[in-house]
Amino acid sequence: MKQKISSCCVTPSQTGDPATELPEQIQKDLDAMGGLDALAGRIPSLHELEKRSRICHVLSDPLRLTILYIIRDQPLCVCVINRFMRLSGSKLSYHLNILKELDFITGESQGNWIIYSITDRGRRLLQCTEHAER
């Protein structure tokens, strides 16, 4: 026995029945924006979605957010950053490199030290995380 699917999003080919209509307001709103094709056109490209996802992933780690807060007000060397982080050198380096890859921080050599600074982009994204909790 064939099971009947009850959903407003089922096409006739999936059920063999005529297409179920969308709720009136949904159809009206879709029509006003230009239909499903227009809606599809508003979705960023897969490449852009992957970039945005990567940013969210980077900011989802409390260790990386901590690093951004540590250097938010002044550039610092790794030894000062690690006094707060208390991570192995390789683990701290890993997180610093991830932040550098997405241009959230920069590292500038000064003699034997690398001084890390938050970039404007990093500062803006850090502010976004602060606004998100409100």
Image (spheres, rainbow, N blue to C red):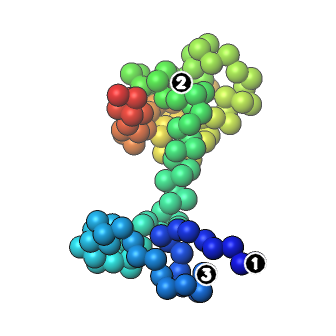
Q: Amino acid at mark 1?
A: Met
Disc 3: which residue: 14
Q: Nearer the viewer, mark 1 or mark 2?
A: 1
To which quarter of the image does residue 114 belong? top right
Q: CA distance from mark 1 to mark 2?
A: 58 Å
Q: Earlier in the sequence, mark 1 or mark 2?
A: 1
Secondary element at image label 3: helix
In this view, 85 is above or below 100: above
Q: Amino acid at mark 3?
A: Gln
Q: Is residue 41 left or right of residue 51?
A: left
Disc 1: which residue: 1
Q: Residues within 10 Å of mark 1 (few under 14, many from 20)?
A: few
In this view, 67 is above or below 18: above
Q: Is residue 77 left or right of residue 23?
A: right
Secondary element at image label 1: loop
Q: Is residue 133 left or right of residue 53?
A: left
- Where does the image place residue 89, in percent across and percent down from the top left? 72, 26
To which quarter of the image does residue 30 belong? bottom left
Residue drawn at 51 percent across, 47 percent down: 55
Disc 2: which residue: 66
- Where does the image place residue 23, in percent across and percent down from the top left? 36, 67
Residue 111 in sight in this render: no
Q: Nearer the viewer, residue 78 or 127?
A: 127
To which quarter of the image does residue 64 belong? top right
- Where does the image place residue 134, in percent across and percent down from the top left? 35, 28
- Where does the image place residue 71, in percent across and percent down from the top left? 46, 24
Q: Nearer the viewer, residue 19 or 30?
A: 19
